[in-house]
Structures are given as C-alpha cells and as structure tokens.
Amino acid sequence: MSASRRTTPALLIAVLAFIVIAAIALTGCGPKVPDVTGMTAEQAVRTLQDADYKLGDVRRMFTPGVPAGQIYQQDPAAGTSLRKGESVRVTVAVALGSITVPDLSKLSADEASQAIAGSQLVPVQVDQHSTDVAKGSIGGQVPAAGAKVDPGATVVYVVSMGAAPNKVKVPDITGKTQSEASAAIEKAGLKASVQRAYSDTVAKDRVMLQNPAKGASVDPGSLVSYVLSLGKSSKSVTVPNVVGRREADASSALSGAGLSVQVNRQQSATVAKGVVISQMPPAGSKTAAGGVVGIVVSLGSDSTIAVPDVTGRSSADARRAIEAAGLVAYPVDQPSADVDEGNVILQLPVSGSRVPAGSSVLYAVSSGTPE
C-alpha cells in the first residue's frame, strides 16, 4: 500500500469534522435562550441559571389580560442563539395601583425626573421661589412618596428657585419716546405695556403718564404701563373715573364707554383687595374710541396668600377655592381605598401656608380603589 493511501482515513476524518462544524454554524446550532415567558421573575432566574444565563434588566408594565408578576416579554426571544453567561432582559406585568411613588426629597431635579420615569410614571416639574428650601432642591411632591399609583400616572414635584429676587426701582420715563421708554423699562428688568391717549399739553409720541410711578419698588419682571400722547384731541372718548371701584364695576363702566380694559394687579396697604388703585389714561382725559385703559387692581396688603384647606373636598370645590385665593390649581390623580373617588387626598403646600400670589397648589385627587 502506498503512503498516500495510508493517509486517506485521516484526511477523511478531517474533512468530515469540517463539514460537521460548518453545518452547526449554518444551522444556528449552539446555546439557545430558554423561554421564560409566563414565569415569575424568581422562576426565570432559576431557569436562566440552569442554562448558564443571567437575568438582566427587569421592566415592569401594566398589560391587560396578563396576571400581575408574570413575565410576558423577553429579550432576546426564546430560541435565539446567545453565548453562555450573557443576560436576558424581561418585562413583568403589574397590576393597576401597584407602582410605588419614589421618594424625591433628597434628589436633584434631574435625578427626580429620572427616578419617576424609571418607575413608569410621568414627571412634571413646577418651579417656585422659597425661603425655606435651597435653590435646586425638591420642596415637595404629589402624590407623596410611598403612595401606590397606576403605571403612567403623573408625579408633580416642586423645585425651589431660592428666595425671590430683590425689588427693583421703576425708572422715570415721562417725556420720553416709546423706544426710549421701553428701553429704560427693559434695562431695569421690567416689562412694558403702552396705551395711547390725546393730550393738549404733551407733544405727540411722548410719554405723558406712567404706572407705577418713578422710584416705586417692584418685583423683577413686573409690568410698567405708560401712556403715549396722540397729540391734541379730535374725535375722542372721555375716560370715566373707575378708581376706587370693584374690578367688575370698573370693567363694565369702561366697556360701556366704548373702551377696552387691561387689568394689572399689585399689593396695596391702603386699598382693599379687588378694588381699583389707579387707571391709565386718567379720568377725564380724551382717548380714541375703542382705546385701551389700564387699571391696577389691589391684591390686598399682604404680599403672600394663605393656602386654603382643600383636603377631603371635591376636585371641583378645591379648584374653586384655590383660584378664588389667587393661586393656581394643579390636580393629580391617585388611587385610594380610603378617600372617595373625586375627593382630595392631600395637598401641597399644606393649608395655612403663606405663598406668593400666583403660586401653584398641588393636590392629589382620589381615582377610587385600585383594581
């Protein structure tokens, strides 16, 4: 027998081994991911460990028709080729009212948003000035930490803007042009609002009146109204006197005279809440028919407002009480087995707290017993 014939069996074995390996590769043979759908997370851990895999990220989501605690989705899918030791991500069904609201009290605003979103909830941030909570810190949340809510529920949290900024002085703009007046107001960090009226004494296109008066101390961003002269009067309307009247009466009188109304508000130690402090143009002046008359309505003597108690009240009653106090109502739904559906479970800030006018009052409204 020749040498070449003596090596033939070895060559055949090598060729056959190559064919087998290639067939395995082409047919996708090798480690396969087991099917863990329908199992609990604990069962899935054991099943994956037996197959030399690990349980990866566990996502929780409400899914109609799937029992709570059961895995209904996995990635990679069952039967997929995957190297030993790799992780398999799963999604577990949860029941309504089964998501626990995270505690945000020690988190930053960004961390709070991530914590809420990571719990399958929707974050909503409200920024407010506070002298008690450091700037950038969480001053409260609704629903409260530990509350049970539905997947996708809204969680509102208050982020402190720090103490309110110092007051600024209103510049003197009388006699200036519109561009000069607006530039001076904006430079002071305030907002400008212009009206026009006729005048026999102030040249056309010059500021004849302003409100607040020069030198007044106001919050940054406050509105400064001023009146530009239209020159000497021709066909015009006489502006009625509405100072000292209630807001509704003043608006009615101005509308009856064929004028439009712009309402501004500010605190006053001498004028009762809801009463007109001043007007622009002033009573007796001439302005064009349909022209705008700005009125300043008193918010009362205190720069802060007492938060009403709305716990236990209906959502509609709570909104009315909050808005009547000059505050902004911010309801959030929350399941409850103890509070009747539609009634307020809790509120933030708590009743009796004093807050600046226009602040938000957050309150959780019962959506009924969790299913």
Image: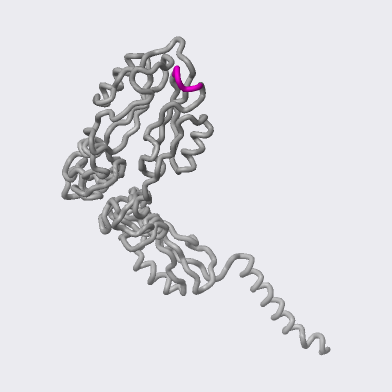
Q: Which residue: 49% across, 60% down?
A: 77
**Does residue 345 appear left or right of residue 296 in this picture?**
left
Residue 315 located left or right of residue 166: left
Asked if residue 61 shows in the view, the reply is: no
Question: Magenta part mainly helix, strand or loop?
Answer: loop
From the top left corner, tell me how far across and down residue 357 is, in percent.
Answer: 29, 41
Q: Nearer the viewer, residue 342 or 53?
A: 342
Residue 367: % across, % down: 24, 44
Q: How many marks?
A: 0
The residue depicted at 23 percent of the width and 35 percent of the height is 270
Does the magenta run of residues contain 201? yes
Residue sitting nearer the eye, 364 or 362: 362
The residue located at (80%, 85%) in the rendering is 5
Residue 114's place in the image compared with 33, above or below, is above
> Which residue is rendered at x = 21% and y = 33% of the image?
272
Q: 280 or 165: which is nearer to us?
A: 280
Looking at the image, which is closer to me, 36 or 266?
Answer: 266
Q: Quadrant of residue 197?
A: top left
Q: Residue furthest top?
A: 235
Vertical order, 113 against 226 (above or below): below
Q: Is residue 280 above or below residue 143?
A: above
The N terminus: image quadrant: bottom right
Q: Position of residue 302 (x, y in %)?
A: 24, 42
Residue 76 visible in the snapshot: yes
Examine the image and state in which quarter residue 246 appears: top left
Tell me, yes or no, whether the highlighted magenta stretch contains residue 364: no
Asked which colour scheme the image uses, the reply is one colour
Magenta residues?
199-203
**Residue 79 location, x and y as percent?**
50, 63
Which residue in the rendered view is the most extreme toward the right?
A: 2
Q: Quadrant of residue 298?
A: top left
